[in-house]
Image (cartoon, rainbow, N blue to C red):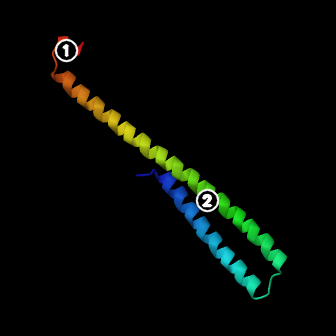
Amino acid sequence: MLPQDLQARREQLRRGQRGLERQVERLTDTYLIGVMSLPEYQRRRQAADERMQGLRAQAAQLEAQADRHARLAGWAASAADFCRRIQARLADADVTRRR
């Protein structure tokens, strides 16, 4: 499971992407009904596309961070399990075996 801050950031990025998708739809509708000129539409659309690309890059970085977190959590659990097993064996071992 991801820490709360990573989950919150993931959801924030998803909301940002959905909002930007709606903005592009409204922008396209505005152009199609003739309220906006083609050059203005192209300028705004390019800016929106660049923002979307930035959000996608952030999402990819976040997923990589989440993967690293999951791997580290797995390693930590394995190490803790190993320590428990060794401690149990040492508790049952005689003095000679402990050395």
Say what amino acid the circle numbered 2 marks: Arg
**Residue name at image x 67 percent, y 58 percent:** 54
Quarter-of-image position of residue 19:
bottom right
Q: Which mark is residue 56?
A: 2
SS assignment at label 2: helix
- How far apart are labels 1 and 2 at the CA level? 56 Å
Quarter-of-image position of residue 45:
bottom right
Name the residue that disc number 1 marks. 97
Figure check: 73 above or below 83: below
Q: Does the residue at mark 1 contact the one at mark 2 (Cβ under 8 Å)?
A: no
Q: Position of residue 2 (x, y in %)?
A: 44, 51
Q: Which mark is residue 60?
A: none
Q: Position of residue 1 (x, y in %)?
A: 40, 52
Q: Residues within 10 Å of mark 1 (few under 14, many from 20)?
A: few
**Residue name at image x 65 percent, y 70 percent:** 20
Q: Position of residue 17 (x, y in %)?
A: 60, 66
Figure check: 72 above or below 32: above
**Residue name at image x 33 percent, y 37 percent:** 78
Say what amino acid the circle numbered 1 marks: Arg
**Residue name at image x 59 percent, y 70 percent:** 18
Quarter-of-image position of residue 97:
top left
SS assignment at label 1: helix
Q: Nearer the viewer, residue 50 or 96?
A: 50
Q: Which one is earlier in the sequence, the residue at label 1 or at label 2?
A: 2
Image quadrant in which the C terminus is located: top left
Using residue 15 as the reference point, say whether residue 38 is left or right of it. Answer: right
Q: Nearer the viewer, residue 66 or 49?
A: 49
Q: Position of residue 95 (x, y in %)?
A: 18, 12
Figure check: 53 above or below 40: above
Q: Find the residue positioned furthest to the bottom.
A: 33
